[in-house]
Amino acid sequence: MTAAEFQQISHTIPTNAGIYKYFNTSNELLYVGKAINLRKRVSSYFVKNHDNYKTRKLVENIHHIEFTIVDSEQDAFLLENSLIKQFQPKFNINLKDDKTYPFIVIKHEPFPRVFLTRNIIKDGSEYLGPFTSVGRVRELLEVIRYNIPLRTCNLNLSRQNVEKGKFKVCLEFHLGNCKGPCEGRQEEEDYREGLQQVKEILRGNLSPVLNMFKEQMQEHAMNMEFEKAEIMRKKIESLQEYKSKSTIVNSRIGHVDVFTVISEGNHAYVNYLRVLNGTIADTKTITLEKKLEETDEEVLPYAISYLREAFNSLAREIIVPFEVSYPEENVTVTVPKLGDKKKLLDLSAKNVNYFREELYKKKILHLEGKSDMEKKNVLYKLQADLELQELPVHIECFDNSNFQGSYPVSACVVFKDGVASKKDYRHFNIKTVEGINDFASMSEVVYRRYRRLLDEQQPLPQLIIIDGGKGQLGAALDSIRKLDLIGSMTVVGLAKNEEEIFFPGDSQSIKLPYDSESLKLIRRIRDEVHRFGITFHRQKRSKGTFKNELEGIKGIGQNTATQLLQTFRSVAKIKLLTLQDLVNEIGQAKGKIVYDYFHKPEQGNTSV
């Protein structure tokens, strides 16, 4: 659907709160979104120039739009989440969490059994959990079985079977682990009291159980039943030891859910701490794949909804690092600055950072410290996967970067025998290119790099990786061709985010297995060139090598320039704004100054 086609139907879109659904020509659901004002939200897709490729692709594929009006923002939020889970549209956030979690079940039967399960059967049984750790569930069950005598057999203890005397007590009865309901030695009411104690323990509320045990211990001691009193003392000791292992924050905090989020590229990681009675009962970190450059503020409410539903949370307070739109009734959203709640938030942040770092270590390949044979084996694998003529013992990788749409620089990293050779790293200030032009910049730096290696008679790499895909690959090849080096080395392009490898002239890309050592090494090289390039940028900014282009506009100060960049993210986007957009953001006078600067007759209304 084009902007012109959309304008013909825009007036038919309601201004109410609700959800909108985008479909393609095959009636396939592409995207589901929510909005307080449907017309305003949907219009934003068709009146803006989108920098993100996937957003442009989504808009190009929209054939028709459907709406559902709801009564409130909360209803829109719930309906959006429900439809995403049901249909999993290709352009919506993708939650990468296909695990099944363990529960503790209290079976719906006479004298109910208590055990671990992953299968939920709708037979009236009560399921407590879920839990993220099987080990923690087993530990809980051990604590329960030591302190509360419950049956573990699978006999049918119906009243008729017990009265007929069909069963005999087993060893568990003689060991004191069961009170013998199979022979009618325990009433169902007494058994239910034990089950209530189990529920209190599983909810993290150990105080009622401890108090009851203490009363029983004192009663046995007063009656001179010292052996029974000693048994109760050991149970109290066991529960207190279990309680001391739990991370206790502050019992006055009660039940709360804590969430933090961190984004990296097209992925977001969200950590969840479940706090019961001031004690951390569970923690879970999930990965979400962002499809349309969603912000953390957009990702976090979706993750909160999923995690609270998955873990059956009834907490009335959620703790988050920033304000989020989470319209669930009777739920308070807290952004703490100090105190125990802030400590919980910091702990959640540590967990999500640790998760991301561990995930990163699994995704990349570090050959530092490995034997020569181990290094060679990986390089032989890379040679085979990419069908290279020579073993790639010398690999170089290039990447362009710019700051807020201005001041382009480039970086080159060098790996020898699979290991970073930092003394050979090079960074480049772009000299011959005006404005932001990734292709021309790549052509310049590749030419400068290999012109110098030739002049100094230095060895050339066997493999060159161009981070950026087909366009940058073609620009790099132009320079290789000018230097008459075609055939002297292999040059490939690496598509950003997609991890697809392009060879010159090939219409189809190569996708290496996600967990292959070849791809892990390529990721390591790509991430290193990103790190090196960003570090170079920061050094330049800290030394005042360049300042923001907006600050060079007469009448525009640093604060106004920063405000614009924080709102619109780049100078390139600011150049495309209308006068009214600028006036709404920074006022009439300054808005006109910026607009006039970027729309001088000789400059035209273009962006690069």
Image (cartoon, helix red, strand yellow):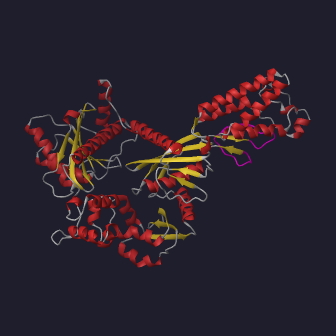
Camera-nearest residue between 580 and 288: 580
Camera-nearest residue between 563 and 61: 563
Q: Residue at x 78, y 28 (%)?
A: 217
Does residue 359 appear in this view? yes
Is residue 357 highlighted in magenta?
A: no
Q: Eyeballing the image, is 477 above or below 225?
A: below
- In the image, 596: left or right of 241? left
Q: Eyeballing the image, is 447 above or below 207?
A: below
**The C terminus - image quarter:** bottom left
**The N terminus - image quarter:** bottom left
User: Residue 353's quadrant in the figure?
Assistant: top left
Q: Position of residue 90 (x, y in %)?
A: 45, 57
Is residue 115 highlighted in magenta?
A: yes
**Residue segment shown in magenta:** 107-125
- In the image, 102: left or right of 144? left
Q: Position of residue 263 (x, y in %)?
A: 41, 48
Q: Position of residue 499 (x, y in %)?
A: 34, 46
Q: Position of residue 557 (x, y in %)?
A: 25, 60
- In the image, 220: left or right of 587? right
Q: Residue at x 26, y 71 (%)?
A: 592
